[in-house]
Amino acid sequence: MAATTKPAIAAVLEKKRPNPRIAQMRRTLYFLSRNVLAILGIGILIFLIGVAVYGIAFDPESATAMQYYCGTYTGVGSSSSGSVIGCTSVCTYPIGTPPPAPNCYPTDAYNPSLVAPTIDLAHLHGGPLPLGSLTVQLAGSSFFSIYQGFVKGAEWSLLISTSIVAAGATIGLVLGSVAGYKGGYTDEVIMRVTDIFLSIPGLLLVLVILAVVSGSFPTLWGRILILIGGFTVTWWPIYTRIVRGQVLVTREQKYVEASRAAGAKTGRILSRHIIPNSMYPVFVQMSLDVGAIPLAVAAIIFLGFQIFPSVNFPEWGTMAAQSVPAISSVLIQCQINSSCYFPWWQLLFPGLIVFLFAISVNFVSDGLRDALDPRLRR
Amino acid sequence: MKMWVYITRRILLIIPVIIGVMTITFGLVSLLPIQDKLISHYGRTKVGYAQNVLCTSLGIQQPGTCPNPAYYNGVHQLGLDQPIFVQWAHYIWNSLTLNWGTTDTGSYASQQLGFSGSLHITTVLGYLLPYTLELAAISLFIILALAIPLGNYSAVYRNRPIDQAARVMSFSGFALPGFLLGTLLLLGVTAAMGHVTACGAKSDAFDYWYGSWAPSFCFPGSKYPSFIGSYYQTTPTGFPTLDSALAGDWSLAADSLRRMLLPAFVIAFGAIAAILRFVRNSMLEVMNLDFVRTARSKGVPERSVVARHAGRNSLNVTITVLGLTFAGFVGGFPIIESVFHLRGIGLLLAYSIQPNYDYGLIFGATLLFTLIVVIANIVVDVLYAYLDPRVRLG
C-alpha cells in the first residue's frame, strides 16, 4: 500500500510546486509564443527540418548523389541558341569522386517526361519555378536542380552547423565554468588563451586551418570533419567568455553556498547548480550561431576554397556561393550585349534558402533573448 | 592612474597576446608537410623537394629511389631538424623582427597581382595595407554614422515603425551574406545606371564600380600617373585616395572614393546589424536612469535629453561593442574585396588560398589582420578609459 501512495504523493507535490527550472522554461515558452517573429522563425525552422527529414526518409537517392546535367552555358542571346556537345547519357555521380566527363543528357528526375534525347537548353536552364530550376556550376557546363540541392543540402547544412555549435558550446561550457568557478591562475590562463583566439578574425583562422590541414584529408567525411574542427576552434572562445561571465554571477548565489556548506564537491556543484543555471545565454548564442555557419561556409566557398572533394556538393551555403560568380559573368555579358538570357533564379533561390535559414534562426534567438531577459519583455 | 600610465600598461599587456597569436600560427605552420615549407621558402621554380626521388634523376645509376639532397639541405638550412622549441623561438624572433619570408613566384596570388620575382611578404603587405585601411576607415565612418542615430531613434521610438524598420535591417544584416549583398548591389547599380562610360572609352557600369582604380585605358598613353608605382603602391603616403589628392589629381581621388563606397556600405551593413541592437538596448537602459528623469523634470527639452544626457552615456557601450565586433568586421574583408576586386590585404589572402597555396602570404596576411584587431582593441580601450574615467581609476 505504502509503495503505491508514495509516488502519488510525490506527483501531487510535484504538481503543486514545479521545479523552478521548469517553471522558468514555461515562462520562457509563454513569452516566446507571444512574439510573432519568433513564431514565424520557429515555423520556418520546422519546415527546413522537415525538408531534411523528407530528404533522409523519402528521397530515392542517397544524400551524396546528385543528378548532374551537362550542357553549354552561354548566357547570351535567346535561351535556345546554345548547343549541347557530347551529352550521351544521364548521369548520377557520388560525391567524393571526381566529376565525370560532361556527357550527360539534360534530364529531370522530377519531370521524367522531359528526359533526353530532346536536348532542350531552355529546359536545361530551368525556369521560374523552383522545382524545375537548375543552377549552374563554376565551370559553366554542368547543372543541378536547385530543388534537389535544397532537399539534400538540408541534411548536410543542419548536420554541419549543429555539430559545430554543439562542439563549441561543450568546450566553452567546460572551460568557462572551470575558469569562472575556480578563479585565480586557472581563470587567468584560460581567459588569456581565449583572448588570443578571439583576436584572430574567425573566418581567417578557419581559412588557415583548412588550407593547412585539408591536404591530408581527401575523403568526404575527412573534409567534413576538418570543417567542423576548424569552425569549432574559432567558435569555442565566445562560449567560454559567455559561460564564465554567467558563472561569476551564479557562483555567488545563496543556493551554491548552501550546497557547499552541505559538503558538495566541486564537480557536483558545477554540474548540478552552476551550469544548469548559466545555460540560457548559451542557448541564445547557440541559436544565433547555427544560422551563421552556412553563411560562413558560403563565404569560404565563395573565396574559391574547395572544402568538399566534389565541386558539386549539396550544401546550402555552397550552392549560394557558387551561383554568384556564374551570375556575375552573365551580368558582364548582359552589359556588353543588349539582349541576354538572364537566369535570375540561379541567384535568387539558393540565396533565399540561406537567407531564410539565417533569418529564421535570428528571429528565434531574438525572441529567446527577449523572453529570458525580464527587462526586454514587452 | 594617469592616462599615459594606463596606455603604457595596456600596450605592455598585448605582448603576451601577440606572442600567443604567433604561437598559434606556428602550431599551424608546423602541421604543414615539410615539402610545402621548403616550397614556400625556396619557391616552386627550383628542383623538387620530395624526400625521396628516383636515383636516376640524381645521376646515380641504380634502380629505386634515393634520398633527395635538396630536401635534406633545405631541412638543415631552415633548421627544421632542430627541436621544436628552437624552431618556435626562431619563428617568434623572425615574426617580431618583420622577417616574414618571401612570396612564392609560382603561386596564384603572385601571378594575379603581377609580382615579378619573389618579393618580401612585408613589402607586399606594406603596399596593400593602405588600401585596406582606407576601406576600413570609410566603412567605420558609415557604421558610426548609421548605427548610433538609428539605435538611439529605435530606443526613443520603441516598438514604433522606425524601431521595427531598424529591427528588420538588423536581422537582414545578420542573414545576408556579404558576397550576396555585394553582388545584388552591383546588379542593382548596373540595372539603375545602364551603360555608363567610365572615362570616355567603351566601358560599362559594372566595370565602373569594379576594382580600385580606373582601367589603364582611361589614362592618356595607357600610363598611370607618376605617383602610382609598379605594384600600384602610391607615393608619398601609400594611401591611394590621399595621394591622388596630394598630387592634385582630384578626379582620380574621387574615382577611388566612389569605388570604395559600395564595398564599404556592404561591410558596414553586416557590422551595423550587431551594433544597432546593443546601442538600442544600452540606450533603453540609460533612458530609465535617474539623471534622465531629473533632466526631464527640470525642463530640459526632449531632444537635448536624448542627445546629451542619454546619448553620451550610451556611447560607452557602443565603443565596447565596436571593439568586440571588430574581429568579425575585419574577417569580412577577403570576401568584400574579392566581390568588388578591390586591391588590399583581403584580396591578397583570397588569392593566396587558391589551389596553388602561397603559405607565406596566407600566414602573413592572417598575422597582419590579427595585429590590426589587437591594435584596434587597444584604441577602443583607451577611448573607453577617456570617456569613462572610472575605468582607469579603478
Image (spheres, rainbow, N blue to C red):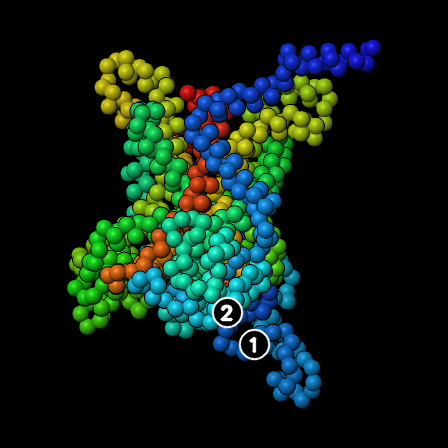
At mark 1, the secondary structure is loop
Which is more toward the observer, B130 or A333? A333
Residue B150 in percent (x, y) is at 30, 33
Residue A118 in percent (x, y) is at 44, 64
Mark 2 surroundings: few (<14), some (14-19) or many (≥20) residues within 10 A: some
Which amino acid is tagged 1?
Gly
* Residue behind mark 1: B48
Residue A232 in percent (x, y) is at 57, 46
* Residue behind mark 2: A88
Q: Are marks 2 and 1 on the same chain?
A: no
- Quadrant occupied by the N terminus of chain A: top right
Give how far apart the Cα atoms at labels 2 and 1 are: 41 Å
Q: Which mark is residue B65?
A: none
Foreground mark, 2 or 1?
Answer: 2
Is the residue A321 above or below the residue B321 in the image?
Answer: below
Is the residue B105 above or below the residue A66 in the image?
Answer: below
Is the residue A134 above or below the residue B113 in the image?
Answer: above
- Quadrant occupied by the C terminus of chain A: top left
